[in-house]
Image (spheres, rainbow, N blue to C red):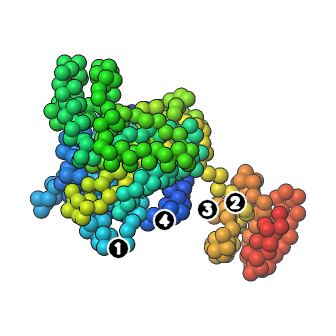
Amino acid sequence: MSKPKFQTPAGMHDILPEDQGYYQKINDVVKNIADFYGFEKIDTPILENAELFSKGIGASTDIIDKEMFVLKTKGGDFLALRPEGTAPTVRAYIEDGFANLPQPIKLWYSGPFFRYEHPQVGRFRQFRQFGFEIFGEESAVIDAQMIQIFYNILRELKLKNLVIEINSIGDSQCRPYYKKLLSNYFRSRESALCADCRRRLRENPLRILDCKDEKCQPVKAQAPQMIDHLCEFCHKHFKEVLEYLDEIGLPYRLNPYLVRGLDYYTKTVFEIFPESTPTPKMVGTPNRSVGEEEAVSKLSALAGGGRYDVLVKLLGGRDTPACGAACGIERIVGLMKAKAISPRKEVGFDIFLAQLGTLAKRKSLKLIEEFRQEKVMVAESLGRDSLKAQLARANKLGVKYTLILGQQEALENRVIVRDMKIGRQESLKLDKAVHEIIKKIKNK
Ligand code: HAM
């Protein structure tokens, strides 16, 4: 078959009806957990001033250097499709006066984000994230609770064997000295680094620790580690975070190379991974939208975040400690599919309404609305005229009762109710039908 002339842009996909259940389920779980932990929802624009991100995320990060979709408006402003949600939430925190309210401020968001990445398994140019941010709390217990929240969401979605990787990247007291140590170390081994890392060495040597290139791994393995060079304050903070995690029994792994791809972090950084994915082949319905081979590999983090105590000030607000994280929704969907986790029960219909003739169709529309208001799930085939075809569909759906509104019944304002299990039929007055059916369903 030839390719259609118009296709989704590279790295972007439709969410087809068969996949909507996954996205709905994830949204429901996230909202319930947000409510439980006292987070309020915020929606920020898809487009923001491009400088918000270059300043907030850091000019030498891949996101800013290579991955932003930037456009120039007719008025000459440079706007960017948001690549992440933290900088916009901080912008809103400052602009919308959250700093003047009693702290902490707890916000969550969910929606599409954009990064001009090389599309591959679990990596898209338009993807969805949900994120949680807490402003105005510096205690280590908040870092641990943030990790717990994301872990709980993933567990609630029935994902098992999750691994939390955690590190501390210090603060403005201890990081500059460590960066210098790291630079000296990598400079003495520059020829053993990949081309990207040779560039990173000049711009931001911490990024080298994040490099996945085979060539850099032996050099990285011998590099000085931040954890050995934390100042007293950061050391104590990190120790406390780990103690809290021990207390709640979360399975974490220290990863001294975890630095994250955004520059705004201070102290705690973390990512949550699926421990292993059995096979990249999809189980269950093939997901045409994400791609047949879609499954989240061991290298793809489901969630990532950490503390960012300097970002609010950097973007023009008061000195405000903050902590947060975000999770990739497509990655969760990919993993749920790979593990054959069904997002929800099939929508079950209680009754089927079969009709015959124009008057019956008219009365059916009204009757369906009455059932809808009473939250009774009623299936129908209003466009069909054949009673046989309609009854066949009722059988297929496995409903408990079928209501038959034929021409005669419509004239007499009555309806036939057929108990599909025992085949018994009775005639009810139309204005009593909803009430009677609800009684019958409840008694079944
Ligand atoms: P991030 O690690 O860049 O952090 O993204 C968070 C999650 O979004 C990732 O773990 C991944 O699941 C998903 N994700 C990122 N890029 C893609 C992509 N191209 N395709 C599919 N999924 C993707 C942040 O965005 C920070 N704002 C998190 C944060 C919130 N830190 C503090 N508060």
Say which residue label 4 marks: 38
The amino acid on which the numbered mark 2 sits, given as a three-letter code, is Phe
Mark 1 CB lies closer than 8 A to ligand 1: no
Q: Is residue 278 above or below residue 326?
A: above
Q: Mark 1 or mark 2: name the one nearer the start of the chain.
A: 1
Q: In this view, does 322 lie above or below 429?
A: above
The amino acid on which the numbered mark 4 sits, given as a three-letter code, is Gly
Dot 3: element: loop
Dot 2: element: loop
Instruction: Give the image location of residue 149, x and y in percent.
Output: 50, 53
The amino acid on which the numbered mark 1 sits, given as a three-letter code, is Leu
The amino acid on which the numbered mark 3 sits, given as a three-letter code, is Gly
- Mark 1 to mark 2: distance in Å? 47 Å
- The reply to whether residue 376 is visible in this rendering is yes
Give the number of the mark in front: 3 or 2: 2
Say which residue label 2 marks: 349
Q: Mark 2 or mark 4: name the one nearer the start of the chain.
A: 4
Say which residue label 1 marks: 101
Q: Which residue is drawn at 18% across and 21% down?
A: 188
- Mark 2 to mark 4: distance in Å? 35 Å
In this view of the protein, which residue sits in the foreground, 135 or 49?
Answer: 135
- Mark 1 to mark 4: distance in Å? 15 Å
* Pointer 1 local density, CA inside 10 Å: few below 14, some 14–19, many at least 20: few
